[in-house]
Amino acid sequence: MAVKRIPEGYHTVTPHLVVRGAAEAIEFYKKAFGAKEIRRAPGPDGKSIMHAELQLGDSRIFLNDEFPQMGALSPLALKGSPVTIHLWFEDVDSAFQKAVQAGARVAMPLADQFWGDRYGIVVDPYGHQWSMASHVKDMSPEEMKKAATEAFAKMGK
């Protein structure tokens, strides 16, 4: 039997997060996003996490503790991250509130956006940004262009 080149349960892109305090982060992601832990492998000291896998909806993420000696630094060590991980939800309002109640900080309040999504951004206690959305309106390219022009004009004022 041939080996599957992309293992069962995975998609083409799998985010791999470096966090300071991976065990605590796993518990946070369970509370905040309903993640399910698939597996974890301890680091050489038996306490740190060398590799863990979580299931969020139909997707997986990898994560591990910081290992500065190997160049694995978290957003806390780097004083921020240029990456935002996007999550889709059927009910983004409930999901957003759940994340905030679990300890996420609101970076962009949840609101209906000009591109047709109800969208907001939170930052987890480990420095990672998570955008969250439900698609609420299908728009043609013309409608999208008009809505963008109007939104950008309001921002300039």
Image (spheres, grey):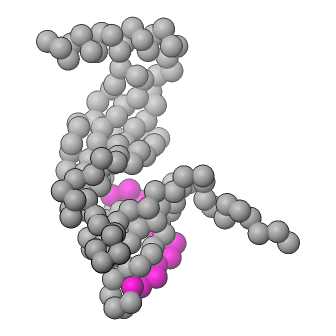
Answer above or below: position of 57 versus 70: above
In the image, what residue occupies the spot 30% across and 38% down? 120
Residue 4: in magenta span? no
**Is residue 71 in view?**
yes
Q: Residue 68, located in which quarter of the rendered image?
A: bottom left
Q: Residue furthest bottom?
A: 45
Figure quadrant of the C terminus: top left
Figure quadrant of the N terminus: bottom right
Q: Residue 127, located in which quarter of the rendered image?
A: bottom left
Report x, y in % for residue 23. Answer: 33, 76
In the image, what residue occupies the spot 46% across and 78% down? 40
Q: Which residue lies furthest to the left in this view?
A: 157
Report x, y in % for residue 137. Answer: 46, 22
Magenta extent:
32-43
**Is residue 124 in view?**
no
Residue 98 in the figure: left or right of residue 44: left
In the image, what residue occupies the spot 19% across and 50% down? 105
Residue 40: in magenta span? yes
Report x, y in % for residue 50. Answer: 41, 79
